Image (spheres, rainbow, N blue to C red):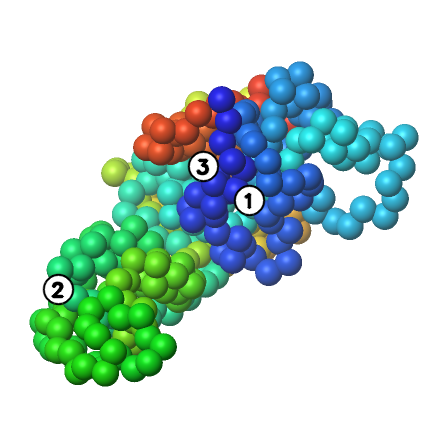
Amino acid sequence: MSLDGPVFIERFEEYCPQWLAEAGDPVGLQIGTVNKKIDRVMVTLDVRPEVVAEAIEKNVDLIIAKHPPIFRPVKRLDTNDLQTNMYADLLKHDIAVFAAHTNMDIIDNGLNDWFCELLGIQDTSYLTKTHTIAYKKLAVFVPVDDATKMRKVLGQAGAGLQGDYINSSYSLIGTGRFTPTVGANPTIGSIGKEEAVQEAKIEVIFPETIEENVIQAMLEAHPYEEPAYDVYPIENITKEYGLGRVGNLNKAVSLKEFVSSIKETFDLDGLRIVAEDENKRIQRVAICGGSGEKFFRDALKKQADVYITGDVYYHTGHDMLTEGLTVIDPGHYIEQLCKPKLVELFNQWKKDYNWDITFIESEVNTNPFKFR
């Protein structure tokens, strides 16, 4: 019962790539190695000493964490310090830690989309743009008999994704001509004899971030010793990504009703509100998990009736009031939603790829705050 660590990490990075993280965010492998067999993966919001103790007890090989445990440089490796000793325990028990922080906030079907799903926020778009990804086009020439296989391989590599459509491509049939010379090892034809082969020109588009994978897949599947292909940029298609989400409730509700719904949804004992009028009607909602106070003006620009985010600073609260924005601060810990949602996703991959591996949620409550 095990899976090669790089196999799981490669699939995870396809879903939640590191390049989508905000600049300076220490995502990816934090501690240990994933170049090993993995039997048990535990998902947590935070990596704390009690979480590490839980991982040791449950024989975990890999921890997937929302919050990077080494967010700032470690100045001393003094194991008398509980936090530092935690790192030593992880290494001693060969438990790797892999973090996905702001990239999990930005990706499609990520944390902010899960919040919207729970709260009934529909027709969503990002709150604050972070990345614009350019697209390229590949045109490859293959014998007609190999065209179906090539289209399938390119689709599996991620090419041909256009909006809600997959495996999009265009083909033309023509004649390829070539003459093998001494030293060639032709799939079709003989040395010194001109050949004419009926070929398909297959065109697919792909985001530039996966160019290396697409080209490698094409080359491995191509029957020719010297494949003919072109890659060029296209200007009419891009893909944008952003932090947070903004969308609409199915119907307007009072702020009081919406606050009650949030408390019930996230099982909160209390939360903070920045508002002049608690009877205000709410329909357009902006949300950003974690500490998103610096994006509150984007919520205003997107004409949100209310902005949901955590860790609002006292003086920023004054600015929000001055500019007429209603804000709900449910705290940072609502991000624990990542635990059940990621385990659900990983178990779907387990089924899809027939993996022999176990995924579990950390049962430790790492919220440092209590309400009385």
For the residue marked with disc 1, what is the amino acid?
Ala
Reading the image, the residue beneath label 1 is 100
Residue at (86, 40) in percent of width and height? 77
Q: Is residue 121 left or right of residue 128?
A: left
Q: Percent x, y for residue 346?
A: 42, 32
Question: Counting residues from the N terminus, which is met first, the one under dot 1 or under dot 2?
Answer: 1
Tell me residue 275's x, y (percent). Answer: 50, 43
Residue type at numbered disc 2: Val
Element marked by disc 3: loop
Reply above or below: 139 against 248. below
- Does 26 sit above or below residue 1? below
> In the image, 124: left or right of 300?
left
For mark 2, give the secondary structure.
Answer: helix
- Mark 1 vs mark 2: give the one in front: 2
The residue labelled by disc 3 is 278
Q: Quadrant of residue 234?
A: bottom left
Q: Label 2, label 3: how many angstroms apart (C-alpha)?
A: 67 Å
Mark 3 belongs to which amino acid? Glu
Label 3, residues with CA under 10 Å away: few <14, some 14-19, many ≥20: some
Per the image, the residue denoted by label 2 is 144
| Residue at 45% over, 36% down | 278
Along the line of sight, the residue nearer the viewer: 342 or 160: 160
